[in-house]
Amino acid sequence: MPQIALVVFTYFLGSVSFGYLIGLLIGRDVRKVGSGNIGATNVMRAAGKTAGIITLVLDTAKGYVAVFLGEQLYGHDESLPLICGVAALLGHCFPVFLKFKGGKGVATGLGVFLRIAPLYVIFAASVFLIVTLITKYVSAGSMAGAATMPIALSIGGASAVTTLLAAAIAALIILKHHKNIARLLKGEENKLGTSRK
């Protein structure tokens, strides 16, 4: 498969919006419930814990599989698997099938780094859990966890390409949380365990 075709394929893979599809299976459009996001947190609010967990797993798998395919087909090229991971992330955040209105990229970004740098994910996941448990805001934990990845990779001596990729992904995830940031500043963000009215 030509490199450009693989990158396009992984973008379309990322564009498969599992949260939206799972919502449709139970007769709900998650885009019209809660925050309107297609990610696991809103799916959980709209369709229950099981649906949210399935969405989380499948969205994570998209990032992991994209990098895996890049490694299997072009393992000699360090950058291409990373590009495939970014393509899947962009597909998730800006899915062609949903008029480019997608999720925030946390789970898919997690999948990318579970394949690229699994040990460093432990640090980011720990920060996510600590911040979320202290603040009760999943959005705050997600942004803190994303920001931790490039820092951990840099300290750990990862390649410049991988560290820059992590920084770009973190920036995208934080930018996609702009509405959450606005709600946090206003004190209107939903806390963990509460439902959005």
Image (cartoon, rainbow, N blue to C red):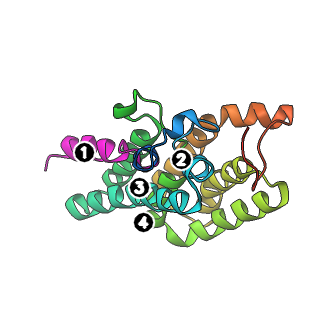
Disc 2 secondary structure class: loop
Per the model, the C-alpha gap separating discs 3 and 4 is 8 Å
- Highlighted range, magenta: 1-19
Choose mark 3 or mark 2, whichever is in front. Answer: 2
Percent from the top left, x then y, of residue 186?
85, 31
For the residues carrying marks 2 and 4, which lies nearer the camera in this image? 2
Out of 49 and 56, give the one closest to the viewer. 49
Label 3 SS: helix
Q: Which residue is mark 1?
A: 9
How many marks are shown on the rendered structure? 4
Q: Residue at x 35, y 52 (%)?
A: 79
Query: What element does badge 1 sit on?
Result: helix
Mark 2–mark 4 Cα distance, whole angstroms, equals 21 Å
Q: Amino acid at mark 3?
A: Gly
Residue 179 position (above or below residue 132): above
Alpha carbon distance from label 3 to label 1: 12 Å
Q: Tell me, for residue 63, which label it has, or none.
A: 3
Q: Residue at x 45, y 54 (%)?
A: 59
Circle nearer the viewer, 1 or 4: 1
Which structural element holds mark 4? helix
Sequence order check: which comes first, mark 3 or mark 4? 3
Where is mark 4, residue-wise? Answer: 115
Going by the numbered disc 4, the residue's amino acid type is: Arg
| Dot 3 or dot 1, earlier in sequence | 1
Q: Quadrant of the C terminus?
A: top right
Q: Which of the 4 quarters of the picture holds residue 129?
A: bottom right
Tags 2 and 4 in contact by the CB under 8 Å rule? no
Residue 39 is marked as 2
Label 2 and label 1: CA atoms lie apart by 21 Å
